[in-house]
Image: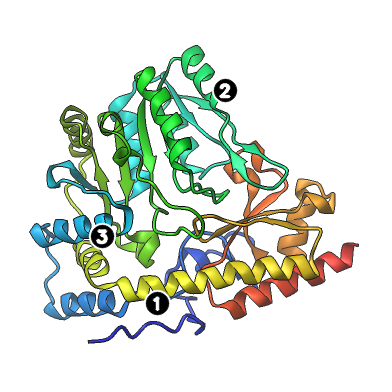
Amino acid sequence: MAERNLDFDTVVDRKNTGCVKYDLAAEMGMPEDVLSLWVADMDFKTSSYVQDALRRQADHGIYGYGAVFEEYFEALQSWYMRHHDWKVEKEWLVKTPGVVFALSMAVQAFTEKGDAVMIQQPVYHPFAGAVQQNERRLVNNPLICGEDGRYSMDFQDFEDKIIREQVKLFILCSPHNPVGRVWTRQELEKVGDICCRHKVLIVSDEIHGDFVFQGKHHVLAGLKKEYEEITITCTAPSKTFNIAGLQASNIFIPNEKLRTLYAGHISACGCGGLNSAGITACLAAYRDGEEWYQGMLSYIRGNILFVKDFLRERLPMLKMWEPEGTYLLWIDFRGLGLSGGELEELIVAKARLWLDAGTMFGAEGEGFQRVNAACPRVILRQALERLESAVKEIL
C-alpha cells in the first residue's frame, strides 16, 4: 500500500468542520473572507496510513476505552532513535492528552504556589499561562534578538535570575516557537549545566523537534546522563502529522521519583487515559508515516524560501527571521513605523489576514507577527499579495 496524501498543493476546505483555525473567525471579529495563518496546525491532509487506521477503527463501530500495548512504544522508540539518536525506555513514558496539559501538570507537580518558574520570552504563550494560572511566580529570561535576526540566550541573566529569584523550574522551548531557533548542542549544554548546578528542574517542550531546516535538533535529556535526572521531555505526533485534535502526547521522565510524582498529579486530576483514536493515529504515524513526513517537510521548506524571496523582492521593509526549525515564520513589521493598533488595522482590516500578534508571546514580540507557513503555496501567495496591497496603501 502506497502513501496517497503527497499532494500538498491542493487546497482543502476546512470551513464548517468545527475547526478552530477557520470556524471561529466571525466570533473573533474577523472579516468574512479572512485568510487564516495563525494557530499552529497544518492545512494538509495527514498521512493516508493514519487515515486508513482511523477508518478501520471507525468501521469497527465500538469506541470504548483505549489501551496502549507494546507496538505503540516500539513505534515511539523507533521514531526517536531514527530521527533524534535518542533511545527512550518504556518505563520513562507518561501519556497525556496534550503538551499544554503536560506543562501545567509539571508546574503543579514540581512547584508550590509562589515558587518561581522561568521562561524565555517571546515564547509560546501557554508557557506563561501554565505559570500564572497555577499561581506561580513568572520569571522571564528574555531572548536576545541580534541584528542579523538570529535570537540567542542570555546565559548570564539566566543564571543570575535563577540564583536571585530562587527558580525551581525552567520551561525550555526547543526548537523555539515563535522565533524558530534550533538550539545548538553547546547552547543546550550551557542551559543543562546551569540547571544542574542550581538544582533546577527542566520541562523541555520538544513538540516541534521534527521540523528542522538548519542544524540538528538535540534532545536535551539525551545529551548527558545528569540531564536525564532533571528533565521532563514533552513530545507528541500532533504537530508532525497534523493530528492535534486527537489528543495524544508522550512525556518521557527517566527519573523514577519525578515520574511517580508527575503521574500522581495526572491521576489526581482525573485524567484516566488517552483518546483511543489518538493512540491509533500516533501508532500509524510513527510506524508508517515516514514518506508523508519527508514530503511535507520538503514542501514547507519550499514555502519558507518562497516567503523569504517574496519579502525581499516586494516587501523589503518587512524582515523574516528565517526559521531554523518549526513551520512558523517570525516576521518583523517594525520597519513600517506603525503602532500596535495601526499594525493590527493593517493586517486584519486592510489585508484581511488572521495572524498571531507578536505581543501574544510577550512584550518582546511587539512589532512582530507569527505566520503559519504550513499551507498550500497558493494560499501563502494570496496572503502575501494581500499584505503587499495593504502596505502600498499606507506608504
The quadrant of the picture occupied by the N terminus is bottom left
Amino acid type assigned to the residue bearing label 2 in the image = Asp
Give the mark nearest the N terminus, 1 or 3.
Answer: 1
Give the mark nearest the N terminus, 3 or 2.
Answer: 3
For label 2, the residue is: 157
Which residue lies at the image location 82% right of the left edge and 50% below the top edge? 338
Task: Work out whether 131 lies above or below 55.
Answer: above
Amino acid type assigned to the residue bearing label 3 in the image = Trp
Image mark count: 3
Tell me the CA gap for discs 1 and 3.
21 Å
Which residue lies at the image location 11% right of the left edge and 72% below the top edge? 62
Are the two marked residues, 1 and 2, in contact with CB atoms closer than 8 angstroms? no
Task: Work out whether 229 lies above or below 112.
Answer: below
Q: Position of residue 5 (x, y in %)?
A: 37, 82
- Residue 246 visible: yes
For label 3, the residue is: 79
Taking the view exactly as shown, the residue that stands out farthest to the right is 395
Question: Foreground: 73 or 219?
Answer: 219
- Residue 129 visible: no
For label 1, the residue is: 45
Disc number lying in front (1 or 2):
2
Tell me the CA gap for discs 1 and 2.
43 Å
Q: Position of residue 8 (x, y in %)?
A: 47, 80
Taking the view exactly as shown, the residue that stands out farthest to the left is 70
Q: Position of residue 203 (x, y in %)?
A: 36, 36
Amino acid type assigned to the residue bearing label 1 in the image = Lys
